[in-house]
Image (tube, coloured by chain):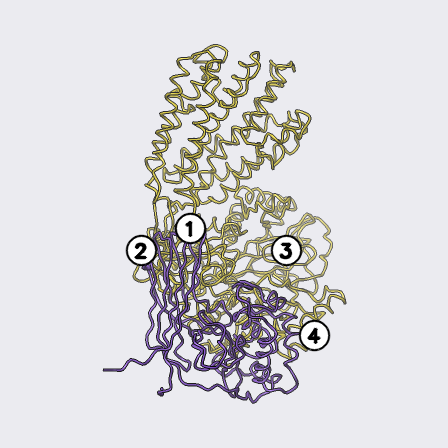
Amino acid sequence: MSNADRRYRIRHRTVYEYSGRIDLCHSYAHLAARQDENQKTESHSLTVLPEPDFRSERKDYFGNKVHYFSIESSHESLDVISDMVVRKEEASPALPSGEIGWEDLKEFHRATDQTGILLGNYILPTRACPFLGSVREFMEPSLSPGKDVMEVVHDLMSRVYREFDYTPGATGTSTALSEVMEKRKGVCQDFSHVMLAALRGVGIPSRYVSGYLETLPPPGKEKLQGADASHAWIEAWAPACGWVGFDPTNDTIPGDQHIKICHGRDYFDVQPIRGIFLGSGKQALFVEVDVERVEALEKE
Amino acid sequence: MDTALVEPAPASSGGNPAVTYQPFATRRDEAIGDDGLLRPGWSDLFDSIQRHGPDGLTTWQSEIHRLSRERGLAYRPDRIEAGETSGNWSLGPVPWVFAKEDWKAIERGVSQRLRLFDAILGDLYGGQQRLFKEKLIPPQIILSHPGFLRALHDIPPRESCVGLGMAATDLGRDHSGRVFALNDRFDQPFGPGLALENRTIVNTVLPNLFRRNKVRRIGHFFVEWFDHLAECAPKHSSSARVAILDATQEDTDSEISFLANYCGILRVIPSDLTVRNGQVWLKTIGGLEKIDVLWKYTAGRELDPLETSRGFGRGIPGMFEALRRGNVAIASHPGCEVLQSPGLFPYLSKICQFLLGEPLLIPSVATWWCGDAAPRQHVLANLSSMVVKGVGPHGDFTTLYGSRLAEAELAEIRSRIEAQPERFVAQEELALSTVPVSTSSGLVPRGAVLRAFSFRGREGVPNVMPGGLARVTTEDGIVVSTREAGESKDVWVLDENYDAKVRISKQVRRSRLTSPETVTSHAAENLYWVGRNAERIDFISRFMTRILQGRTLGFAHATPDEIEHESILLEALFSLHECTGLLDAGNQADEKLLMVLRESDCPAGIGYHLRNFRRNTNLTREQWSTASILAIESICKGWSDNTENARSVFGYASPLESLQLNLAAFLGMNLDSMTRDHGWIMLDAGRRIERAVNTVKLLSFHVSNASPESIESLLNESILFISDSLGTYQSSYRKEPRTGPMARLLLGESDYPRSLLFLLERLQLVFAKLPEPVGFTHPGELIEPAREHLLSFCERLERDGDDTGAIRTYAEEDLETLGAQLNALSDHLTKSYFSHANRTIL
């Protein structure tokens, strides 16, 4: 790591308040940053209130860290606070060449998936990324014979950025892709799903990435959208360059302002918190995310 | 089951069935060889058929029908109600016989297939995924299957789970006698309990034949299975509490109940279980009890809604975490459904060689995956002779037989395959070997499939059930599917050296298994409603008997008073069941009566409550002795049989009496034979609360509806009759019934078992044996206020003696208070012992 590395402190707090009593809660969180990317977690803590009766940690199928916990006595609220410091390598992202035409990639990985990462996981439709006629149609203008895979993905990203409106509140976590396609509106999660469905539909391996984006706008530049919340983007794969990130919400290739948490096939593989509560009543949810750049602590 | 044959059966010439049995010329027959002689093992069976002649087979068949019906075999309420006769499992009298040597080969092949799939499972979950790395199978076939549970990637099957658990393999034989596998089922293999049930019935009908032929017994297979499950309990656990996890409303319901009964294992449903502190617990009336091993008979995909399904309806949140922590063992690995995909078939031979280093003994039917170009071309070129299946979960795509499709249909499936080739496989259509099947026109050959069952026991040694479940094709030659197939057969494996001494189930270390005496909350609730519904049916039927008596006995002259009396009784009945609106529907008095007697959707009707009673008893099958099951059958089936030909309301008089008698027999039997555990308390409480509620409601109706004075005593007499207290009243008072004394008898007589006071005191006594519910007051505490109110009410009744006018001024309010107190008591039981909290997902 060099002096130009950036260090971020990220606090992500999720609060559930219930109108009634909850007697039992089983939950798990995808809130710890991956270690295998160009970033290093210096510290991470996950605080749960009330104190869980049972906690454990593991790696999921995609290599993400998962915290599981259960609260087995009556409670009226649940507070989950993730606090971490991540060091991010300096990066000046540029679009690499995939060195393969998009049509050839399809046969390439079907015949020989010798990458050991089971690309098959990332070319199949999922619940959030079904193969739809409307998506295939949307993909069409980005395809021309023999075009480099990475060019195709980049072009698609820019078109999603231009042709979809960033409208918080227009969609929810369970909004179907077909509705997003129809409304041409959504948030980072929807735009990522649109890209994934479009790319996988033509055989380009791609995966969903959850993470955060630095809050402060660099001087002279427009403020990036997605700040003060969890963010999402995608990564696409080609044999020559491996996985490369694309952020359709900001029409940019993620660099050192994007802090990656987890990746999977879609949002539901990496949902920040998922839980099942036994009890009655309604719930209210509050999320607060703070991403701040911090100086390195001098070692004494 | 998807293999089919289309040849018509040859016409039978009548006469002796064993002599006239004629196999097809082009197909292999299991009983008769190409030389026209009986194959080894069949001669004694054919001799016996010959000796008994055509009537013999008919007698056997009808005996089997009777036994299956009595045992409630594969009872499907949903289907029977829909008027489908296929609700009953059908079993033919002629078994499928295997000679010792023939069976040995099958046993070897099935054992190997089991080891093979176990190895594949271990490679996919917690293993090295060598199948992918060595390109032995296209990853897509596995990765696209919803039964491949990524959440379990770190749970090695043989460490935390019981490996594959019990496997079912469907086998068929072609004309050359070669055995092929048609399907493999692991996730919730249908049929092991039915195989045992079939055996029990056939053994009862043909005991001598069975013994003479040294048929190997299958009961021991289950003993070893449960023994093995107990051994799989987590190491650190001092006990080994085993339970069968069922899904309740599935059609395997009675099969699993039967197995649970046979083996003395507790059957639970998902809502009975909860995960706390990373452990699995059973909710019982007495509190939480730890469970160490589960034989799951639910879909693996639905086991833990937190980590898998999106349907959230069923399952036990936290279950996978308990599994990961090694705190529970589950048979089978919940991710085994992916192995059922026919997409594996084309690759099994090579995989077997690679993983086991052995050639595959029983190959799958020749299968091609359309995801690869060369096999796809082969399939499309030969589509009209292929069987097309989906690679996804069983049931996602209805199997298509190319040979039976019209040109347009073939074109359609062709374009579907071309659009999404990776979703399809196609197979050769196998001409199944035939077995003799008894029909109304004698013995005829029908294609047959054998479902073999196996599991790997201690140190991985395969254990194959010496027998199985055979299914035969329907008359038109099509085996529709496993669960709808025409007829089943017992499977006899002969072995003259086989030790006929039964190794009785003492080998099941019963002390280590969950005792069936444990009463789960859900069983308790159903038992409570068995009690309530039984009393309710009795109550309604006494109403009807009284009305019919009114028309036929001495006081019946159709005077205005009598007509008024009948209509008041009817109104009372409908008002008690909160459906007086229905009374406006029928104009004729008879139409109204028939609503109660005949219709199944009238809340005041017998059929309505019989259906609920049947459902409650069905969900608690393991609580009932064989005698009780017969009694339940007499109540339900008896009523529908007896009333089938009733032309008018009078035709119901005698069925009503039988119904009351059958109910009394059922309830009396339980009084005598059930252990006085928490379940019995709930059954008893249900009966008493229902009776109390009925008495209070009936009296309340009576005092709040001013009836003509001229019929008051007739009405009182009817109320006493309906409450089964007429005789008692008459012997105590020796005069015509008056409202005051009647109310005192029905409410406050301290030593009279039908009085409300007695019922309340009795409830107080049995409730004392129930544990304190968590978070609620003890139900006994709700009885005291009701009892005090009753006593003060009775004092006033005593004071006013025969003065009906005076009594009417306050009785209605008192009875309403009592009614509300009883309802509160019932609600309290539901909340504190039965109900499960609502579930919310974020």
Which of the two residues, B753 or B460, is positioned nearer the viewer here? B753
Q: Decide which of tag 4 and tag 3 comes sooner along the chain.
A: 4
Placement of A150 over or under B800, stated as above or below? below
| Residue topped by disc 1 | A19
Identify by letter the chain in purple: A
Q: Colour of chain B?
A: yellow
Looking at the rendered image, the disc whose residue lies closer to the viewer, 4 or 3, is 4
Would you say the residues marked 1 and 3 are in contact, meaning their CB atoms lie under 8 Å apart? no
| Residue B7 percent across, percent down from the top left | 71, 61
Mark 4, other Cα within 10 Å: few <14 / some 14–19 / many ≥20:
some
Indicate left or right for B185 with A216 as reference. Answer: right
Indicate left or right for A110 with B825 as reference. Answer: right
Q: Which mark is residue B120?
A: none
| Residue topped by disc 2 | B239
Q: Which mark is residue B380?
A: 4
| Residue topped by disc 3 | B436
Gap in Å between the C-alphas at discs 2 and 4? 57 Å
From this viewpoint, is residue B406 visible?
yes
Indicate left or right for B830 with A202 as reference. Answer: left
Would you say the residues marked 2 and 3 are in contact, meaning their CB atoms lie under 8 Å apart? no
Looking at the rendered image, the disc whose residue lies closer to the viewer, 1 or 3, is 1
Disc 3: which chain?
Answer: B
Gap in Å between the C-alphas at discs 4 and 3? 36 Å
